[in-house]
Image (cartoon, rainbow, N blue to C red):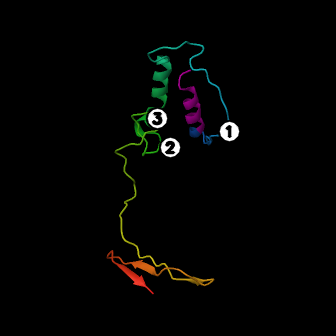
Amino acid sequence: MGFGDTDICLRALNAGYKVLMDAHAVLIHHESASRGKSSTDPHPEDTRFFIARWHKMLREGDPFHSRILSLDRHDFALNPRARSPYAARARAVPVVLPRHQAAGVRLPEAAVTTAGGKVRRVA
């Protein structure tokens, strides 16, 4: 059956189960071993059935798909149009690095960067 692995995971989710990935599991799947390979859709009936069953999820999108990954490619390429849901705004943050004298070693003076971007030396 085409999409069998995806179908069973989605059915398990709908039944209230969790689908977990085990990074140490090793599975061997011989794609289309019983049907033979094809340059067109090897499972047209299964494809129609899968789309009919999961049309809502396909229309709304995979809730587990990261929006930063491209939907147009299958090589985990980044989506150049992706936007973060969080507004990122660069701003200056004051930083104070104190001067220490430890074991007779004098460290350089500390510098403070003010919100205006000016650097001020602290003795």
Report the front residue among 46 and 64.
64
Kind of element beneath mark 3: loop
Badge 1 crowding class, 10 Å Cα cut-off, few under 14, some 14 to 19, many 20 or more, is: few
Residue at the disc numbered 2 = 64
The label nearer to you, 3 versus 2, is: 3
The label nearer to you, 2 versus 1, is: 1
Residue at the disc numbered 1 = 24
Residue type pointed to by label 3: Asp
Residue at the disc numbered 3 = 75
Task: Pinpoint residue 27: horizontal percent, then vertical percent.
Answer: 65, 29
* Number of numbered labels in the structure image: 3
Q: Residue at x 56, y 17 (%)?
A: 32
Rendered-image quadrant of the N terminus: top right
The residue segment tinted magenta is 1-12
Q: Residue at x 37, y 81 (%)?
A: 120
Residue type pointed to by label 1: His
Task: Pinpoint residue 116: horizontal percent, then vertical percent.
Answer: 31, 76
Q: Residue at x 44, y 36 (%)?
A: 56
Report the front residue among 83 and 1.
83
Kind of element beneath mark 1: loop
Residue type pointed to by label 2: Phe
Mark 3 vs 2, N-terminal side = 2
Asked if the residues shown at circle 3 and circle 1 are in contact, with their CB atoms under 8 angstroms apart, the answer is: no
Residue 49 badge: none
Asked whether, in this view, residue 84 is left or right of residue 13, the answer is left
Mark 3 vs 1, N-terminal side = 1
Asked if the residues shown at circle 3 and circle 2 are in contact, with their CB atoms under 8 angstroms apart, the answer is: no
Task: Pinpoint residue 18: horizontal percent, then vertical percent.
Answer: 62, 43
Report the front residue among 23 and 55.
23
Q: CA distance from mark 3 to mark 2?
A: 17 Å
Question: In the rendered view, would you say 10 is above or below 106?
Answer: above
Mark 2 vs 1, N-terminal side = 1
